[in-house]
Amino acid sequence: MAIIGSGILTGLGVTLRHFVETYIEDFKYMGKKAGVQPRMIRRQSPKAKGIVTIEYPMEKMPVPENFRYIPFLVKDDKTNEDRCTSCGICAKVCPPQCIWIARTEDPVTKRPVPAPKDFFIDSTICMNCGYCAEFCPFDAIKMNTDYEIAYYPETENDMRLVYDKNRLTMNESFHWNIHPSVKAAELEAKAADEAKAKAAAEAAAKKAAADAAKKVALAAAPVVPDAPVASVAPTPAAGGAAMAARAAAAARAAAAAKK
Amino acid sequence: MATQTTNIPDELKNDPRVPEDLNNNIFITTLDKIYNWGRKRSMWPLLFGLACCAIEMICTAASRHDLSRFGWELMRASPRQADLMIVSGTVTKKMIPQIVRLYNQMPEPRYVVAMGSCATSGGPFKEGYNVVSGIDKFIPVDVYIPGCPPRPEALLHSFVKLQEKIEKQSIRTVRWYTTGKTDNGMLVPYLGPDLVDLRRADEIKQKTAL
Amino acid sequence: MSEVTATPAKPAAKPAAPAAHGAAKPVAAAKMTPEMSAIAAKFGGAVEAAQYEGLLVTDHSKFIEIATYVRDVLKYNQLTNNTATDYIKDGVIEVVNQFTRVPQGGAPLTLKLRVPRPSGHDKTQPVPSLCPLYPGAEFQERETYDMYGVVFEGNPDLRRILMWEGFNGWPLRKDWKEAYYEGDTKPFESRWPGGDHKLAEERVPWEDNVNYPPGFDPFAFKPHPDGDIYDSMLAPSDGTVSIDNGHGVAPTIVEGLNASEMAELKTDEIIVNMGPQHPSTHGVLRMVVKLDGEKVTDLKLALGYLHRNHEKIGERNTWLHNIPYTDRLDYITGIYNEWGYVLGVERMMGLKTTDRVEYLRVITGELTRLASHFWAIGFLLNDLGAFFTPALYFITERDLIIDLLEAVTGSRMMCNYMRFGGVSRDFTSAQWAMARELAFERLPRTIDELDHFLTENEILKARSIGTGYMSADRCIAHSLTGPCLRAAGIGYDVRRADPYGYYDRFDFDIPVLYNGDVYDRYLVRVQEMRESLKIIQQALNQAETQSKVGDIQGGKKAYNHRVPAGQCYARVETPKGELGYYLVSDGNQNPYKYHIRSCSYINLNSMKEMAVGQKVADSVVILGSLDIVLGEVDR
């Protein structure tokens, strides 16, 4: 049987050790500034001892790459085009249904064009689950890691928490900056896509040339109502190659969505 | 002398109106500044958790983020001793009368932080039948934090923002020192067949009239 | 194994058959287990095989007799789940009761009752209550009453529990629509392709989330008095308690008075309301205690202050949408909640998982168990008066676990990690190294320190030994599960009783202690943390050799799952107890019925019996030892 009070004393010993440890840590880092990175990382590692406080506004813990907050849309740095094709998968998988997408329509043909006319995310409903980013087939929507978005309304009806397309769209470089591990893979995929699109464009151009030749050859022949000529789509211009690739991808996604 | 100056906040140092040779001995400030400086550094939050965000709030008060660095560590369980209400989580219809009552019991000046999506607008549970879509429908909110739930740092960031807001206030214009405009508190809603907001009682009567 | 009567998923060549609830005959009659056959043989005309699963009791007057037989002869001694399903096309509301054997485990037995669906906001015909046989039915039946308007005859306190008395309608009935109702099922049409952001407030006539019945006059209306909770407590008593819970019923003694003088001394009883804003109630729980001096003579709980309509929203969500919502049930233990849900859906769909997935689930799940127990012990000590020091130490440790989970899953608490047939991400090598460091070095050391710090502390012992005692039999009868049940000498743990995951591959013990008081609950939790660590260590070692890195998603990444028609009751052992999901699918993209058997909620059922006869300060400690999380209590 232990002496009465020994349990309390051993407990106090533990607190004393914690107390002393804070000073040991301080001595170790004496002369080094509070914001020195290794110390901060150490404070949140399994080796942390003594003081574990991160002095937030002065020093900021790096957030992990996977960390997710409010989503954003990625646009191509060079062409300034959105990656988004407005396929609507993110709006479908969103659990609280906080994504609104307006699809662009071709003003002439009234057929959908694979680009969003408008895109809203109501960040007051968003539950930061990350489904939109996870299920997006084009890597067009990603989760931001910036959590410093608290605000006080300066005017009445300050609707800044409803993000529209302008506020959602971010550069590719921003995306690669916060998600460095996907940069290489995405660049590679992009290069492959471009090469493919280029090849497709070249093939199409070749085919068009051949068709034109055929047309010339057929010109003498009697007109067939359903001539293959009519079905030849206008050849995409060289600059539209990327667009063609996107349209193909959108068609794939639409097929997947239907399924 | 040098050690003393280091303790003086930046905004009080080096005022051009003070002659150079008296610079470290005399400080000029406005009453607003000194008042706001004191106020923003000694907020006592109400110890009051609602849902998931409350866990992050507790984490903020714990060792790693250590709220006491801001002078805000005294979480008071009694609204009479609190300056700040952190609405940390989903506000339900069943709970809102209590929250409004707590708010009314807080002495002025009082501030409210809506932490997380749910407190801001109902969040992912907005469509629910027992969920109030935003605490700002019933009590005035000073700072909003989006996120579900916001990280502890995001909560700390909201405190920085709140301090910013307090700095902008002036004793002459704030509600609680102007005569005649004293806020007697909000009307406490009650629970009828649904939540009844008494400020809209006339409208309700009109619209439901048979 | 859990009972799954759904056929395994076939590759969806054509969409599964649409809802069959309108059919006159049951779609899939339940498979008869030996126990069900025994009941059918004994009560011939009164029962028949129910739709999907279990027995349907057609003769309600025999129900209590059958339940008694189930309890006493078949030894299903715990009512694990009570809920209802609204089959609107059949015009019936089906009350579901599920019974388990504790501690033997095995598949639960299901007894169903059908009552005709009343029109409008009427209550149903009364059905017999199970409260006299299973006291644990009380809260669950009150919830079913609150949500469906099913009247249970014989329930001692049949009032609304999650909503307030006087609320208009029975929210979970299929034809009851809330103010912000937008569509029966998600995804809503308005979001794409013609999505124009509209606040929910702009869509509804009241510009708010409210709805009033026609003719409602806010000036004439008298709010339902909150007093109904007090009414039954107001009757003066003689200072003794009616419940014999083993605490003894010592009368109040005032020094210097003899017995007859004591009898003449009239002490006033007072009713004290604690909560919903109270530092000791672990959230927005409200506790009304009747005190004689400092002794609790009666106690009532008022719940629902965080009722967020998980089940109503869950029935509208697609199967996938529900995963992040489960995180917000017991927000300390996000990953484990997801596990229970995906387990149920996987069983209904017949999905297979890979080794890697199962190991990752065990590792992350057990890490959250550790985090939860750290939290529980820290705040139990808070309630005991060791204000915040232990909690601070343990939150520091929990933060490390949370850091790891955040790095892996992307969020600190709302991990959204599980997928049907998989998990969302694998560990990177750095994260794996951190997990190893935590499991092999940091956490064992911390738990030893915790033990050293607290276990022998005289104040802790003085306050907690003998406090909140409940005997094993009463614990089972009250449907208590989790560490509190194991502290009363019943080694019941779903990981062993109804195994899931890869728990059969690990060598671990189920800690059991026999005193059934707060101190033993604390000790059980400490022991469980050690066992959890053992599991994590083994899982980390096994996963390195027996699974392939990155092999985490079974099949294609799909978001529009169709679950074959059927029902499933899947349960897992969360740190708080047995968390069950009762799921009914009609073959569509959305659950037809989504019910959460919440352990925190059902554990609270026994709170009264534990606290009555104790001091009021102890009632706070008892609540702390039950380790509730309000998100899960109120859902």
Image (tube, helix red, strand yellow):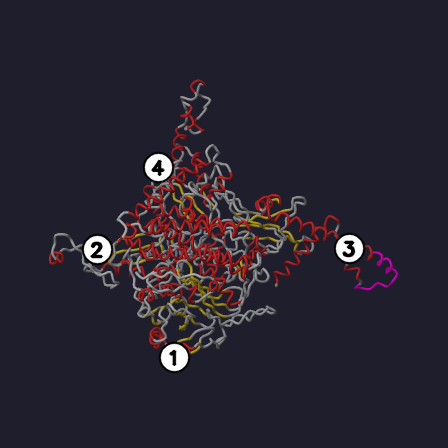
Other residues around mark 4 within 10 Å, as few (<14) / some (14–19) / many (≥20): few
Mark 2 to mark 4 CA distance (whole Å):
47 Å
Q: Are marks 2 and 4 on the same chain?
A: no
Quadrant housing residue A28:
top left
Other residues around mark 2 within 10 Å, as few (<14) / some (14–19) / many (≥20): many
The residue nearer to you, when weighing C47 against A31, is A31
- The dot on residue C548 is none
The answer to whether residue C317 is visible is yes
The residue nearer to you, when weighing B12 against C433, is C433
Query: Relative to C247, is B171 above or below?
Result: above
Q: Amino acid at mark 3?
A: Ala
Front position among marks 4 and 3:
3
Residue that badge 2 annotates: C292
Mark 1 to mark 4 CA distance (whole Å):
74 Å
Residue that badge 4 annotates: B180
Q: Amino acid at mark 4?
A: Gly
User: Which chain does the numbered disc 2 sit on?
Assistant: C
Residue that badge 3 annotates: A203
- Left-right relation of A68 to B201: right
Q: Are marks 1 and 2 on the same chain?
A: yes
Query: Relative to B111, is C568 above or below?
Result: below
Other residues around mark 3 within 10 Å, as few (<14) / some (14–19) / many (≥20): few
Q: Position of residue B156 (x, y in %)?
A: 45, 41
Q: Indicate whether residue B105 is drawn in magenta.
A: no
Magenta span covers which residues?
A: A212-226
Q: Amino acid at mark 2?
A: Asp
Residue that badge 1 annotates: C46
Q: Amino acid at mark 1?
A: Ala
